[in-house]
C-alpha cells in the first residue's frame, strides 16, 4: 500500500515585535551636542590666546617685523630688550643695560653645534669691521664649560662670552636653537634677529644698519 504523504504544516507567522527603536529626542542635540562643540571651540580659542600671550618671545617675533634682503628679521615695534648679566670666561661681568650708547650683538652658541663652528671665524673677523659703536657678546648654552672655553680658544674669539647657566636668557629671548643672533640698538631696543648661522658679513652689517636708524 502506498503511504500517504504527511501534510507539512506551514510555520506560524512570527509576530512582529511591538517594541520599536526610540527616536533620539531633538532636545538632546541642543542640550548635549551643541554645548560640547561650543566647549571645544572655546578651548581652542583660549589655547590660541594663551600661546599669543605666553609663548616665548622668539615664537612671536615673526609677527612683529619684516625679513630684510639678507634674511634677518627686522623688528618694527622697538621693544626694550630683556636685560641680562653673564660672567664671561675671562671672569668679567657683562650686563646688557651697561652697554647703553652701544649697539650690541648677542650671539647664542654651543661648542657641539656645527653651524656655530662654521660662523665663528666670520664673527671674529666681523667684530673689527662693524665699527667702534658695536659690542658683541656670546651667550653659551647647554654646554660643558671646558668645551666652551676650548672652543673660544681654538677660534681665537676676540669678544667676550659667558654661559646662560639656567637658560633664563634663552627663555627671555625665545631662543629655539643654536646659533641665533640678536641685535640691540644703543637705546636698548631689540631691532633684529637672525635664526641660524651668520653666513656673511653683509648680514651683520644690515642688522647693525637697522640699529643705527
Image (tube, rainbow, N blue to C red):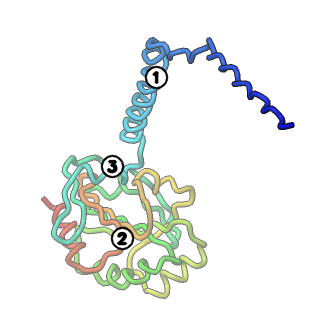
- Observer-nearest residue: 102 or 68? 68
Mark 2, residue position? 196
Residue 94 placement: quadrant? bottom left
Question: Measured along the vertical axis of the image, is residue 84 above or below residue 53?
Answer: below
Q: Is residue 87 left or right of residue 55?
A: right
Report x, y in % for residue 173. 40, 54
State which quarter of the image contains the C terminus: bottom left
User: Tag 3, which secondary structure?
Assistant: helix
Mark positioned earlier in the residue sequence (1 or 3): 1
Q: Is residue 48 left or right of residue 87?
A: left
Mark 1, residue position? 33
Name the residue furthest right.
Answer: 1
Residue 75 placement: quadrant? bottom left
Q: Is residue 35 left or right of residue 183?
A: right
Q: Is residue 158 left or right of residue 102?
A: right
Query: What's the distance in space between the residues labelled 2 and 1, CA to CA?
Result: 47 Å
Residue located at (53% from left, 69% from top): 91
User: Tag 2, which secondary structure?
Assistant: loop
Mark 2 Cα within 10 Å, few/some/many (few <14, many 20+)? some
Mark 3, residue position? 60
Question: Measured along the vertical axis of the image, is residue 32 above or below residue 187?
Answer: above
User: Tag 1, which secondary structure?
Assistant: helix
Amino acid at each position: 500500500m502506498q503511504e500517504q504523504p504527511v501534510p507539512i504544516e506551514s510555520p506560524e507567522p512570527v509576530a512582529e515585535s511591538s517594541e520599536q527603536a526610540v527616536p533620539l529626542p531633538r532636545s538632546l542635540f541642543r542640550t548635549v551636542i551643541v554645548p560640547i562643540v561650543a566647549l571645544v571651540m572655546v578651548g581652542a580659542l583660549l589655547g590660541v590666546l594663551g600661546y599669543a600671550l605666553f609663548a616665548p618671545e622668539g615664537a612671536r617675533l615673526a609677527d612683529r617685523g619684516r625679513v630684510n634682503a639678507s634674511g634677518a628679521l627686522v623688528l618694527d615695534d622697538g621693544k626694550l630688550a630683556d636685560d641680562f648679566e653673564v660672567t664671561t670666561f675671562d671672569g668679567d661681568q657683562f650686563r646688557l643695560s651697561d652697554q647703553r650708547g652701544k649697539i650690541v650683538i648677542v650671539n647664542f652658541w654651543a661648542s657641539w653645534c656645527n653651524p656655530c663652528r662654521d660662523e665663528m671665524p666670520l664673527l671674529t673677523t666681523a667684530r673689527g669691521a662693524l665699527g667702534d659703536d658695536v659690542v658683541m657678546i656670546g651667550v653659551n648654552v647647554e654646554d660643558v664649560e671646558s668645551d666652551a672655553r676650548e672652543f673660544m680658544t681654538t677660534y681665537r674669539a676676540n669678544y667676550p662670552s659667558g654661559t646662560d647657566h639656567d637658560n633664563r636668557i634663552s627663555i627671555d629671548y625665545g631662543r629655539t636653537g643654536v646659533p641665533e643672533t640678536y641685535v640691540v640698538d644703543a637705546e636698548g631696543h631689540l631691532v633684529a634677529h637672525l635664526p641660524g648661522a651668520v653666513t656673511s658679513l653683509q648680514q651683520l652689517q644690515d642688522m647693525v644698519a637697522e640699529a643705527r636708524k
